Image (cartoon, helix red, strand yellow):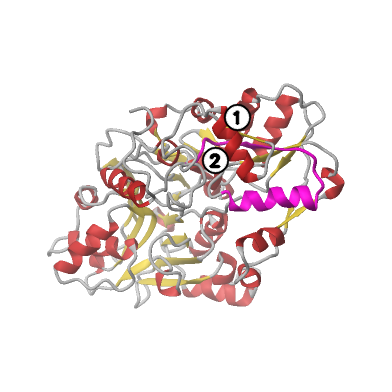
Amino acid sequence: MEELNEECGIMAVYQMGENHGQVNVTPLVVRGLVDLQNRGQLSAGLTSYNPSRDRILQTHKALGSVHEVFRVNLSPQRSRQLMEEYSGQAAIGHTRYATSGASDSELAQPFERVHGRKWKWFAISFNGNLANYQALKDELETTGYHITYHSDTEVMMHYINRELQGDTAPDFHKVFGNLTKIFDGAFNIAFLNGAGDMVVVRDPLGIKPLCYGVKDQLLVAASESNVLLHLGIEPLPLGPGEMIVANRDGYRVERYHPAPRKAYCFFEWIYFANLASSMEGRSVYNVRYRLGAELAAQEPLKEYSQFRVIPVPETSLTAAHAFGFHLNLPVMSGLVRNRYVGRTFIEGASRADTVRMKFTPLREVLEDHDIFLLDDSLVRATTLKTVIEGLRQRGKARQIHVRIACPPIMGPCFYGIDMPTVKELFAPHHLQGKPLNELPPAVLAAMARELGADSLVFLSMEGLTRALGLPKEDMCMACVNLQYPTEMGRRRHLQAQAQAGLGELPLAGS
């Protein structure tokens, strides 16, 4: 409901073998980027490799959705022209939401660095966030670099360029192995150079998802598996600390970092990933269904037989269906989202007015009924407060019992989710900044009163872990348990706690 934003989506396509040079992969990249639109709608772009052009690497990118940037369905003739103009045997693509840097067209990706030597001329697409961006930026500036766009992708590009210095073609295993000693955070990278080398890299913790597949010597890598499925390719996970190196002759998957632990972002399953995707062998749909089932198993009310389950559109729908099924309750559309209220129309409106324009309570479903209002997460709570007010005043609902298919959000994300500061978050101030495995009834009652609800229940940490079906130690759950998987993440959280006036508090499970 709070409309958290993902950092980006990346894609890479390479036609290898005897069809190299005969197949234009650019339309496949655009098609895949449409499937990654859920990961960023601010801008889109691609860089293609075509050695028959004077400009071997050529980049097209702009602000807007994939359909707008590539004129898909908007101007078929212009779209065909773009596919031909940027045709290539290999290409990398990107959809962006800004977590670092401004929201202007110059920061659309891929970033391209032109050089006279083909293997030093490269483009990159980046998915993630560097937690130590500021320190890296400062180090570059003290050694004579000028940072133009104040983006972690720009900083990353400069460090890659450093690794490519010299007179010999790069050993990509060494290049990206060295970078892992410098970068702290989440970083999935698609790299393409003027020599026709493509490299796809997943960071050693595997914080963000990345998969690949091959069919008829066509290699495709993407942030989500549904991209490959739509192309008729069976997806395989690229493991943490692994990389794909491809050229016209073929590809190899190799480990460039030992990756002693994993830290998959659990929020991908809860909120961000496409419902049709799978990550680390776990279906997004199945996980969301189990979240609702686990929440139903926790239900503390003894009498709810006449209740209706009302999901908050749209990522909570699957959990709501499971919740209703296990409690033998109807799941009904009592809250309708207006898909056509755009950013421009609501610019300058207050958050409450924005919510009222986006969500319409259905009195026909709600009036004189007790309801379970089910949402996937609770972040700031400002949106939820306005929705509950609308359900009572406009929808005429009787009792509203809020159920959240996620534990309380306790800290910001430094790895790519645009999460609010500690001061803006709802739960930390009720819990004195410390996550608890079991919330005291008095605390839950106080939270419910602030929301304007009759009761409030969060999914437990144990329920979350069971729903995910992966070892707890393989997950990054820092935003709910404050156990950040990198050194800079831990430092930045302590700073954030202090700025919020909560001090340095012990972490959950420590």
Residue occupying the point 23% across, 74% down? 116
Q: Residues within 10 Å of mark 2 (few under 14, many from 20)?
A: many
- Residue pictured at 45% horizontal, 74% vertical: 105
Q: Is residue 341 above or below residue 223?
A: below
Is residue 439 something that shows in the picture?
yes
Locate the C terminus by quadrant. top left
Image x and y of residue 483, in percent: 36, 36
Residue that badge 1 annotates: 290
- Residue 270, label in figure: 2
Find residue 495 and name its label: none
The disc labelled 1 sits on which kind of residue? Arg
- In the rendered structure, does residue 185 fall within the stretch colored magenta? no
Q: Which residues are magenta?
A: 381-409
Horizontal side of residue 203 vs 47, given as left or right: left
> Can you give x and y, in whole percent of width and height, for residue 497 in the image?
36, 46
SS state under label 2: helix
Identify which amino acid the numbered label 2 is placed on. Answer: Ile
The mark that comes first in sequence, 1 or 2, is 2
